[in-house]
Each structure stands twice: as C-alpha cells, then as structure tokens.
Image (cartoon, rainbow, N blue to C red):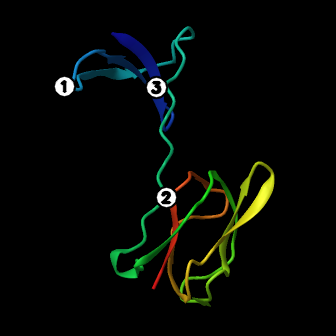
Amino acid sequence: MKNYTVTVNGTVYQVTVEEGTTNGVVQAAAPAAAPAPAAAPAAAPAAAPAAAPAGAAGGVEVKASVPGKIVRIDAAVGSSVKSGDPVVTLEAMKMEIPVVAPQDGTIASINVSTGDAVENGDVLATMN
C-alpha cells in the first residue's frame, strides 16, 4: 500500500492506495488539518477542455498536430473558412504553429481557450 496526501480545492486528504489489485480498492480518510510534510502530493490529472454543446458539434474535427499551448484563436464560431486558413495558433518549442482548416467549411465549435495546454491529437475545433 502507498499513502498519499492529496489537496483538492484547498482541502487536504490522506489517501491509501492498494497496489497489485484489479478491483480498484481506494480508501480515503477524512480531511486532514494540514498536509504531512514528508509525503509528496500526487499529481492531479489535467482538466479536459469543456465539450461543445451537442447541437453545435461539426462533422469535421480540427486536431492538434503537436503538443503545445494555445496562444491565439484565429477563427470564430460561425465563420466561413477555406482549406488552409488558420483556425487556432499553438506554441510548441517556442514556435507558433497555425492549425489550419482541413477543408472549406464553417466553424461549428471552438473547443479550447487561449492558454490551454493541448496534446497531439486533441480536437481543437469542429467544422461543418
């Protein structure tokens, strides 16, 4: 078993995780008054980008080709774009890389915001 101290929204929890089982047993203690100084907090998973409303999603996905950070939104929802027009710009390894429309169409949704970190293959926008 491994013990972790996890802080969620300012509340500290002592968590015990049992290793080597497939049934996912996790025990959480009541909130602690302060974190234990010797235990390192577990890394929190990154928040997923908010999904677009079901009616607004387009059939064509515009995906990130490299991991990076969104520095600019170049197209607005409802705008018409031609193949090769920039939809969003991301920064990777100190370079700005435009993510372009794969075909002519209309932007149905933008699934990221400026400053968001994205991974390779993440859907940044959808088009009709």
**Nearer to us: label 3 or label 2:** 2
Give coordinates of residue 84: x percent, y percent: 66, 80
- The location of residue 5, given as percent across then percent down, is 46, 19
Residue pointed to by mark 2: 49
Q: Earlier in the sequence, mark 2 or mark 1?
A: 1
- Give the spatial CA distance, label 3 vs label 2: 23 Å
Q: Is label 1 or label 3 in front?
A: 1
Residue type indicated by callout 2: Pro
Helix, strand or loop at disc 2? loop
* N-term-proximal mark, 3 vs 2: 3
Specify the quadrant of the image occupied by residue 40.
Answer: top right
- Mark 2, other Cα within 10 Å: few <14 / some 14–19 / many ≥20: some
Question: Disc 3 marks which residue?
Answer: 6
Q: Identify which residue, 106 or 39, lies in the foreground.
A: 106
- As measured in the structure, the alpha-carbon distance from the residue carrying label 2 to the one carrying label 1 is 29 Å
Residue at disc 3, secondary structure:
strand
> Depth check: 121 or 76 in front?
121
Query: Is the C-beta separation of discs 1 and 3 under 8 Å?
Result: no
Dots 2, 1 in contact, CB < 8 A: no
The residue at the point 56 percent across, 51 percent down is 119
Q: Quadrant of the N terminus?
A: top left
Q: Which mark is residue 40?
A: none
**Residue indicated by mark 1:** 23
Image position of 22 with respect to 56: above or below: above
Query: Around disc 3, counting alpha carbons within 10 Å, would you say few (fewer than 14), some (14 to 19), or many (20 or more)?
Result: many
Q: Residue at x 61, y 84 (%)?
A: 83
Question: Looking at the picture, does residue 45 appear above or below residue 98?
Answer: above
Residue depicted at 23% across the width and 22% down the height: 25
Disc 1 marks a residue whose amino acid type is Asn
Q: CA distance from mark 1 to mark 3?
A: 21 Å
